[in-house]
Image (cartoon, helix red, strand yellow):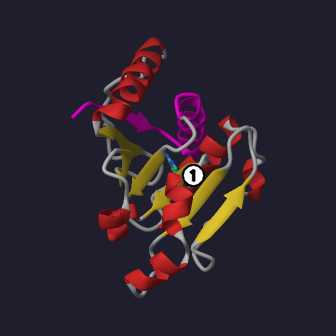
Amino acid sequence: MKAVMVCSEGPDETLALGEMLAKWLRPGDTVNLVGDLGVGKTVLVKGIATGLGIDPATVTSPTFALIHEYTGSVPLYHFDAYRLKRPEEWEDLGYEEYLRGQGISVVEWGDLVQVYLPPQHLEIEIKRVTETKRQIWFRAVGQHFDLVIDELGRELSHAGLGDRYCYGNR
Ligand SMILES: Nc1ncnc2c1ncn2[C@@H]1O[C@H](COP(=O)(O)OP(=O)(O)OP(=O)(O)O)[C@@H](O)[C@H]1O
Ligand SMILES: [Mg+2]
C-alpha cells in the first residue's frame, strides 16, 4: 500500500495540505478521514474545498445533517459518520448514489462505515502530537490512489515536507 506522511505544524498547514490534495482528486473519488474528535478532519476538508473553488467559510462539520453538499469545480459531498446510530441511517441517506456519483466524497469517521466505503479509496489518518502539531498519513487503499500518493509525495518533497515526523512536545 502506497503511503506518504507529513507533519502539519498548525491549522494553516493542514488547510494548505487539503488544497494541495484537491488537485489530484477526481470525480467519483472517496476519501476516508480518520482521527480523534477535534483533531482537524474538518480543517482538512476546508482545505480540499478551497482547492475545488468552494469558500471554506461555508464548510462546517455535518455532524447533525450527516452530509453537506457544496458546489465547486467538482461537487463536494462531505459526510460525518460519527453520529450515526444505526447503519440503516447511512443507507437512508442514499450514500451509494453519492459515492458512485460524479462528486468527490469525503467521509469524516469513515471507519465507522468502513463496510460501505468503495474498495478503492484514499485514507487519511490524523494524529494529535501536540496542541498544534498533527502527524498526517495519506494511504492509497487500492491502486487507483497510488498516483495520488506519488504526486502528493513529490509535491511535499519539493516543499521540503515529504515523509516528515512531528518532533517535540511543543
Ligand atoms: N495542525 C493542525 N491541523 C488542524 N487543526 C489544528 C491544528 N492545530 C490545531 N488545530 C485545531 O484543532 C481543531 C480541529 O477541529 P476540527 O473541527 O477540524 O476537528 P475534527 O477532527 O473535524 O473534529 P470532529 O471529530 O469533532 O468532527 C481546530 O480548532 C484547529 O484550529
Ligand atoms: Mg469534523
Query: Where's the C terminus, which quadrant?
Result: top left
Q: Amino acid at mark 1?
A: Gly
Return the residue nearer the eye: 115 or 135.
115
Locate residue 14, reporting x and y percent: 53, 41
Q: Is residue 17 visible?
A: yes
- Residue at 37%, 53% (x, y): give it: 118
CB at mark 1 closer than 8 A to ligand 2? Answer: no
Q: Residue at x 49, y 16 (%)?
A: 159
Decide: is 29 above or below 69.
Answer: above
The foreground one among 98 and 147 is 98
Residue occupying the point 33% across, 37% down: 166
- Examine the rendering and report whether any part of residue 83 can be seen: no
The residue under the point 78% across, 47% down is: 55
Q: Going by the image, does 57 lie left or right of 63? A: right
Q: Which residues are magenta?
A: 1-25
The outermost residue toward the left is: 1
Q: Establish if 43 lies above or below 161.
A: below
Residue that protrudes farthest toward the bottom in the picture:
85
Query: Residue beneath label 1, please?
Result: 101
Q: Is residue 9 magenta?
A: yes
Number of marks in picture = 1
Secondary structure, mark 1, is: loop
The answer to whether 55 appears left or right of 121 in the picture is right
